[in-house]
């Protein structure tokens, strides 16, 4: 009525009968405790009251928010929502670029946020998904993606070509990651087999580890995924050796809070991650 001037024209615009519109206006006036329209009668148009202008302003705001919510829900159902993903170096370098590219191709409007942290205590409840190199206790669901075998990387000529026995690493200079996450478990596995390398440098960065190996500081035992991300195969100064006997591989999982209902975007992220990791595993 505020736009049309009469109950009849407003009813026609809305597709209702005039009596229905009148009843709705009466119910509104009862709810707000006063008249929202002056009704002069005859051919004169109805006029909105000062109270009616207050109601109209807030009503239009509520309508706009309702329409925005409906549009956001439609985008969410279509997969153009937001996904927060926890990650760590090897996954960030090798797996996630492929996952993100496919998500962007399928859902250009999606909002992807990454949080990289090396920690023994993953805060899964703060994220939609988390890649993690180890099993986690508590109210967490785990999807195993990959067994990531450990290999030895050294300057070419440090060891004879072919597999290196763990006993050869006892006392040998070695560059290593800080003893958190699966690194600690790997070093314990070495020690159980009588191999206690002399750690000459600890650094969190995969690239720094490889740079120190290139510089001659020592060799390094790294997961295959870290070597793949460092493009070691194309570096003629380095040589990659299998270990005999092999160490237990690093396990890579995708985690999320137990009993959480996934959004369509999160569910699709899981599907893509499984597919991407499967293809990487076949190539390595």
Image (cartoon, rainbow, N blue to C red):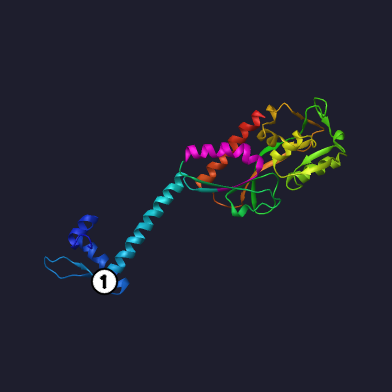
What x and y, as percent, mark residue 19?
A: 21, 63
The foreground one among 41 and 133 is 133
Element under disc 1:
helix
Is 128 located above or below residue 167 in the figure?
below
Badge 1 is on which residue? Answer: 50
What x and y, as percent, mark residue 106?
A: 48, 38
Residue occupying the far front of the picture: 215
Q: Quadrant of residue 173?
A: top right
What x and y, as percent, mark residue 164?
A: 82, 30
Q: Which residues are magenta?
A: 84-107
User: Residue 249, can we see it?
Assistant: no
Q: Callout 1: few (<14), some (14-19), or many (20+) C-alpha neighbours within 10 Å?
A: few
How many labels, in total?
A: 1
What x and y, as percent, mark residue 105?
A: 48, 37
The C terminus sits in image quarter: top right
Which residue lies at the image location 41% right of the left edge and 54% below the top edge? 69
Q: Is residue 266 left or right of residue 78?
A: right
Q: Quadrant of residue 167?
A: top right
Please say whether residue 80 is one of the residues in the magenta stretch.
Answer: no
Please say whether residue 97 is one of the residues in the magenta stretch.
Answer: yes
């Amino acid at each position: 009525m505020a736009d049309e001037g009469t109950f009849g024209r407003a009813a026609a615009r809305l597709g209702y009968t005039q009596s229905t519109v009148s009843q709705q206006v009466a119910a509104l006036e009862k709810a707000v405790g006063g008249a929202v329209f002056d009704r002069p009668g005859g051919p004169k148009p109805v006029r909105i009251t000062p109270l009616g202008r207050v109601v109209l302003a807030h009503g239009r705001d509520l309508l706009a928010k309702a329409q925005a919510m409906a549009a956001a829900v439609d985008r969410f159902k279509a997969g153009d929502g937001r996904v927060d993903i926890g990650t760590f170096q090897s996954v960030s370098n090798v797996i996630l670029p492929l996952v993100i590219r496919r998500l962007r191709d399928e859902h250009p409007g999606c909002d992807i946020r990454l949080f990289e942290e090396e920690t023994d205590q993953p805060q899964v409840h703060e994220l939609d998904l988390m890649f993690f190199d180890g099993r986690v206790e508590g109210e967490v669901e785990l999807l195993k993606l990959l067994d990531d075998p450990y290999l030895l990387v050294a300057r070419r000529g440090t060891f004879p070509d072919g597999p290196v026995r763990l006993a050869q690493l006892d006392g040998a200079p070695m560059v290593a990651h800080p003893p958190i996450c699966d690194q600690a478990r790997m070093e314990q596995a070495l020690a159980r087999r009588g191999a206690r390398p002399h750690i000459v440098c600890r650094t969190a960065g995969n690239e720094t580890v490889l740079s120190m190996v290139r510089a001659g500081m020592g060799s390094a035992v790294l997961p295959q995924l870290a070597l793949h991300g460092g493009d070691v195969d194309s570096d003629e100064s380095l040589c990659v050796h299998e270990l005999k006997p092999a160490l237990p591989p690093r396990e890579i999982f995708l985690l999320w809070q137990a009993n959480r209902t996934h959004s369509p975007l999160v569910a699709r992220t899981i599907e893509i991650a499984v597919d991407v990791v499967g293809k990487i595993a076949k190539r390595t």
